[in-house]
Image (tube, grey):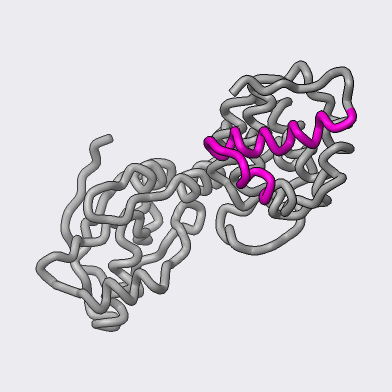
Amino acid sequence: MEHSYEYTMLYPEQIKKDPKYQRNIDAARIKKITKNWDDDLVNAPKVSLRENGMYYVFNGQHTLAAWKKRYGNRPIQCKVYRGLTETEEKDLFVKQEGFSKAVGLVDKLRAEFNSGDPEVMDMVRCIQLAGCTVDFDNRTSQVANRINAVTTAYNVFREVGHDNFINILDILRRAFYGDQKGFQDGFLKGMKYLFKNHCDRISVKQMVTSLQKQPASWYEQKANKFDGSAQIRYAKAFVEQYNKGRRTSRIELEV
């Protein structure tokens, strides 16, 4: 991807950000940049000049915010690109490296979702079909049926496929009555392990009925008593409960 660019002085108030792919401002990071500011080390924000004449920052929004704290609306040197589409801006944002903060997978997923990426859109549709929601922005809020472990959910979706992913979320939602703890990293990984290795032995209805007998916190405590990775520990906790009183159709973990 090659496009022309030039270094240009711009007033901060001229520069906008596109919420479709930009992450939220990190106030603590801005404070740190401002405190340790060094004009000789600061990289010029990368900006796209769109056809409508508006400037959009796609790399360096925290540098720009720190500049405004130090210098107000005094002009700042920017690396201004011409001829980028919004999709190309998003791609450059996702691929940014070097001295800028690495773009996390959740930020990439949010950018891809807002840009209509088919795979991410499929994942979100599966989440909705399972009666759940996903939040790419506020990943600490406690809301019933909301998946905050977005990165883990995405990896599970890619590994087990549409149907199994929906079944996993449906089990966790109904077994723990929407408790967000039931959608945490370990719970998702444990279910992923079971569906990848014992899908033919699992009855969704029976799994829900079995797991409902204990709250999500019980499985968390139980898993911590086992050795191994999170997926193994949680899988063991689920299977132990699932097999209780069951003479047939038991799941035997080979770990």
Nearest the camera: 101 or 4?
A: 101
Q: In the image, is residue 226 part of the stretch drawn in magenta? A: yes
Vertical placement of residue 162 versus 75, above or below = above
| Magenta span main SS | helix
Q: What are the residue bounds of the magenta stretch? A: 220-245
Q: Residue at x 42, y 49 (%)?
A: 104
Query: Which of the 4 image quarters holds residue 130?
Result: top right
Quadrant location, the N terminus: top left
Q: Position of residue 213 (x, y in %)?
A: 87, 45
Q: In the image, is residue 238 part of the stretch drawn in magenta? A: yes
Nearest the camera: 90 or 130?
A: 130
Give the total of numbered labels: 0
Q: Residue at x 57, y 32 (%)?
A: 119
246 relative to 148 in the view: left or right:
right
Q: Position of residue 69 (x, y in %)?
A: 31, 81
Vertical placement of residue 135 versus 158, above or below = below
Q: Position of residue 196 (x, y in %)?
A: 64, 22
Query: Which of the 4 image quarters holds residue 56?
Result: bottom left
Nearest the camera: 218 or 122?
A: 218
User: Does the image show residue 6?
Assistant: yes
Vertical placement of residue 142 versus 235, above or below = below
